[in-house]
Image (cartoon, helix red, strand yellow):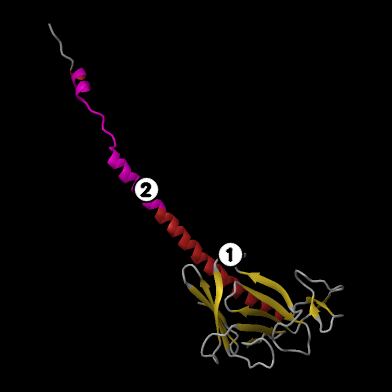
Amino acid sequence: MEISSSRGSRAAGSTVSGFSLIEAMVSITILGLLAVAVVVNLNATSRTEALNSAARLVLGDLRALQTRALTAQNIKTCVSAIPVTICEGPGATCIPCTPAPPFSFGAHFTQGTASYILFAEPDQTTKNWMETTGEAFATRDLTKLGGRNVIIDALFVPSSVSSVTDAQIAFERQNGRMHVNPCMGPPCTEAGSLTIRLKQTQTGAIRTVTLGTLTGRMSLD
């Protein structure tokens, strides 16, 4: 008597399915496109965050300067120098340094650069609201502080048809009053406001920091 095995018949007739070469190539292509999309998205996010970081840094520094002026915080000065100079920060060589409340704290911006200067006015008689020799105590480099490929693209004041190449902001001691001067040295007519436009050079995206001298308001757009 002959007995057939159904199990053996099914095993012999079964086939093993798998990926063909074309299917594998399509899958690899899709994975590659997804990887490219992820990288592009990460780069765009990184550039946006760099611009936002730079804008927050500028606004934060200006607010900190105003606070230092309002609270009449001391800064190390070289009283033996003529005129009196700041001896705080990198490169300071004057000894001894005497802590004293400066007449104002301020910032100096230049169009087309990736950095700006923080300064203090130690001479109570000058009151020019501007950075001059020996008054800088720090330099902010946007590239090194999270603002890669971000520059100070333009500086706008109400009295100018186009942007100015140079602008300085100072906050008066104790009352915190804001002064804006769109020029390098006195005599200088104060501007009613200043708009600092920051630009991410790879994407062209911009953010602006606006200051109003009458209201004392500082905003980020």
Secondary structure mainly formed by the magenta segment:
helix
Return the mark for residue 146: 1
Disc 2, SS: helix
Residue 46 appears at what percent x and percent y? Answer: 50, 62
C-alpha separation, residue under disc 2 versus residue under disc 1? 31 Å
Please provide percent x and percent y for residue 218. Answer: 57, 81
At x 57%, y 85%, the residue is 164
Say left or right for 215 vs 48: right
Dividing the picture into quadrants, the one containing residue 198 is bottom right
Counting from the top left corner in percent of width and height, residue 5 is at 18, 15
- Disc 1 marks a residue whose amino acid type is Gly
On residue 31, which mark appears?
Answer: 2
Regarding residue 71, the answer to whether it shows in the image is no
- What is the quadrant of residue 61 in the picture? bottom right
Compared to 45, does 116 lie above or below? below
Q: Nearer the viewer, residue 60 or 21?
A: 21
Q: Quadrant of residue 132?
A: bottom right
| Labels in figure, total | 2
Q: Residues within 10 Å of mark 1 (few under 14, many from 20)?
A: some
Do the CB atoms of the residues marked 2 and 1 lie less than 8 Å apart? no
Magenta segment includes 192: no
Q: Residue furthest left?
A: 1
Can you say whether 17 is above or below 151 in the image?
A: above
Q: Is residue 163 above or below residue 150?
A: below
User: Is residue 35 shown left or right of residue 210?
Assistant: left
Q: Secondary structure at mark 1?
A: loop
The amino acid type of the residue labelled 2 equals Leu
Residue numbers of the magenta segment: 8-35
Q: Is residue 19 magenta?
A: yes
Residue, x 61% and y 73% (percent of image)? 60
Tell me what residue is drawn at x 44 percent, y 55 percent: 39
For the N terminus, the image quarter is top left
